[in-house]
Amino acid sequence: MTLVAGIDSSTQSCKVVIRDLVTGATIRSGNAPHPEGTAVDANAWWDALLAAIADAGGLADVAAVSVSAQQHGMVALDAHGLPVHDALLWNDTRSGAAAAELVEELGAEAFASRTGIVPVASFTITKLRWLADARPELAARVAAVALPHDWLTWRLRGFGPELPDLGELTTDHSDASGTGYVTVAGENDRELLGLALRRDVRRVVLPRVLPAGATAGVTAPHPGIPSGIPIGVGCGDNAGAALGLDAGAGDIIVSLGTSGVVTAVTETFVPDSSGTVAGFADATGRRLPLVATMNAARVLDVTARLLGVSYDEFADLALAAPSGSGGLVLRPYFEGERTPNLPDGTATLFGMTSASLTRECVARAAVEGMVCGLADGLDALVAFGAERGRILLIGGAAQNAAVQRVAAEVFAQPITVPEPGEYVASGAAVQAAWALTGERPHWLVAAHEITATARPEVRAAYAATPAQPLRAAG
């Protein structure tokens, strides 16, 4: 049996899955936690990666490995291969003002057509501008800029402070497409990098963008890791999930984590200068346009806590209410919102009457509000060229029976729910197999389908409410 390993270095933890090359069956797995916070010492990721590999039984019998990781994180290195600052994660918002400045300086349309994205606080380019303005003495020391998966792949190959060959940094198009300084064609754009760092960047190293299926190098010896194992090119987490799901052109992926993500695998690219749709690349040579919402599973968490019930009890309450929640409509912006862009927004419950304000209707309104926001994201993807094909519902909240039923009603089509799994790590394992054999495997993904009667009136009621109600003056 030939084994391949996939690594998912996510915001919360590092996961490792070891799969059979031929069947894709998971043989064993491991995990290790990451520190909390939105700014993290990158060395903690390396320690967690080694711990997760040890928890998975090591890689002594593994033929290839690859790394997928959270997108956008800023790993800025000095000439000695040391981070000049803690890595700023995708959810670190301190660069919000820097994002607005960059858009004003270059223009939203220019950014969208040139890179596929319009800068917001999530993206790497804004974090570099923040560093240049807030810590110019550190920005002056930046000799290379990498993303989390780039840096971990580099470390697996034996590079780091002991061997700081910055020219050996590599990346892939999917992850690089979310930086803000890589073009739609996948080429590093030094003019944009210089705009971010406010200095001459001709000598600053950016990772080489390798093609899909490429090999980044081989492992150096580390605890639990023998030398000479081929390392796949790696990818960003959303692209990794698409690979792990074996998603193809026309597939829509709706991911329900703490936040919500709607992505579409497409053959073509249409820039969105509004910034609603981020025109990322996938890990196969296609595009992976994406819309993100700040409020997904957190909506269920907040409402279940309010009602004092477990998740199963919450689902039972929601399913006991009629479609449309008796007229209740929740705009679920508990943490502000990104789509629509309301960073200071708040949640609002509309339609409260003595008849509608029941535990059952409140539970269902929470689910319907969350799903309607994601349906708006899907509409935005379709408006910019995505095909509306199969909808794959993944993430922790995707296993909630009420969420499945409401999704089928609101999206007005059958919903495919894959079995729970580590799809980002599995996508990295696909890359490992691809690097080893030269062919992308297509492993079977077990799933079931949910059907329900379409309820367009639910979305109509949601659309009729203001995204943010007017506030009284004074």
Image: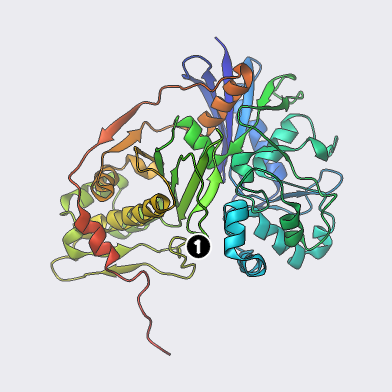
Judging depth in this view, the residue of 274 and 268 nearest the camera is 268
Q: Is residue 311 left or right of residue 81?
A: left
Q: Number of numbered discs present?
A: 1
**Coloured how?**
rainbow
Residue 302 appears in view: yes
Q: Residue at x 40, y 64 (%)?
A: 333
Q: Residue at x 80, y 64 (%)?
A: 136
Judging depth in this view, the residue of 463 and 423 nearest the camera is 463
Q: Is residue 230 left or right of residue 346?
A: right
Name the residue type under label 1.
Ser
Q: Is residue 302 left or right of residue 196?
A: left
Give the position of the N terminus as an image quadrant. top right
Q: Is residue 22 above or below residue 156?
A: above
Judging depth in this view, the residue of 457 and 424 nearest the camera is 457
Judging depth in this view, the residue of 323 and 34 nearest the camera is 323
> Badge 1 is on which residue?
274
Q: Residue at x 51, y 46 (%)?
A: 269
Q: Is residue 466 left or right of residue 195?
A: left
Give the position of the C terminus as an image quadrant. bottom left
Q: Locate residue 414, reporting x and y percent.
A: 26, 39
Residue occupying the far top of the picture: 1
Residue occupying the far left of the picture: 355
Residue at disc 1, secondary structure: loop
Residue 160 appears in view: no
Q: Locate residue 51, reporting x and y percent.
A: 64, 32
Q: Locate residue 126, reporting x and y percent.
A: 66, 60
Q: Residue at x 65, y 27 (%)?
A: 214
Label 1, residues with CA under 10 Å away: few <14, some 14-19, many ≥20: few
